Amino acid sequence: MRAHRPTAEFPRHLEELYARFPFERSLADDPVSEVRSLTHDRRSAEVAGIFAATLAVGNTTAIRGAVRRLAETAGGDVAWLVSPGHARERSRRLRSFRHRWIRGDQLDYLARVLEEFYRRHPSLESVFVRGLEDGGFAGGLDALARTLRGEAVAKRLGPPPRGYRALFPSPYDASGSPCKRLTLFVRWMARDRFPDLGVWNRIPTGELKIPLDQHVHWIAYHLGLTGRRTRSWSAVEEVSETLRRIDPLDPTRYDFVLCHTGISGDCPKERDLSVCGPCSVRPDCRLWRGRAVSS
């Protein structure tokens, strides 16, 4: 079967989709809205961001609820989770926490890892930048994953809880994970345009990769941005490169739009003229390309 590709007009169609998109409507449904409400400085942005990204499993309503519950556990200030002197109380408060398969003991260990890290370093940005300089975006994500796994402090902290390391996959892992949650965290931190936070300033936005969740992957596949049917790091690279050709300086600006086009139901994921009719990228879609439009 011949590979599906977007039309030559796709860049214009995508810009139209972006220009018309109701950002304010979808911001309230996105986990970044919870992160923004908990951010008052760089440290709180990083802490809220990494915990929210770690919890970004399942639908957005459940994720936002989990982030709110975690913030309530910390008394409204997520930086409390990584501040020295709270270890026993933090462990007690998190003991009963659950979100999907993520447990409170895993979040407590993450807090311990970050507490140790912040004793010696001002920001996780330095970790990502070192990896970025050595191995590009994948290298930065790998360095960040290894730091959050606690590899440098395992002797002091002891072994992590069951399933902890799996929360922080690397592009270099044999699984070929798309690393959606860490890639999302980096986008929140490094991109300084709405709706992101932009608290990191050493990472060019042109280097960012798309956080490939199920909604973005479905739409990207059907628009021909990738030919890969399953989410993987290779698919991340393909989609990101296609978007980079359209906007070399800020390719991930389309991520929020593509993601929430799926979440909101603006894309029904089937041929439905009543919904798809006004969609600016319909001419590029695998479901509609070359097919007659009937009412």
Image (cartoon, rainbow, N blue to C red):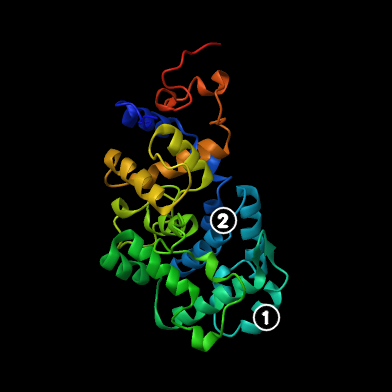
- Relative placement, left or right, of 225 versus 274 is left
Q: Residues within 10 Å of mark 1 (few under 14, many from 20)?
A: few
Residue 284 is situated, as x and y percent measured from the top left of the image, at 40, 26
First along the sequence among labels 1 and 2:
2
Residue furthest out toward the right: 96
Please, is residue 85 above or below residue 68 in the view? Answer: below
Q: Quadrant of the C terminus?
A: top right
- Relative placement, left or right, of 262 versus 176 is right
Residue 71 is situated, as x and y percent measured from the top left of the image, at 62, 64
Q: Quadrant of the N terminus?
A: top left
Q: Tell me the element at label 1.
A: helix
**Residue 265 appears anywhere in the view:** yes
Residue indicated by mark 1: 89
Residue 229 is situated, as x and y percent measured from the top left of the image, at 47, 41
Q: Nearer the viewer, residue 57 or 249?
A: 57
Identify which residue is drawn at 56% across, 52% down.
31
Residue 22 is situated, as x and y percent measured from the top left of the image, at 50, 35
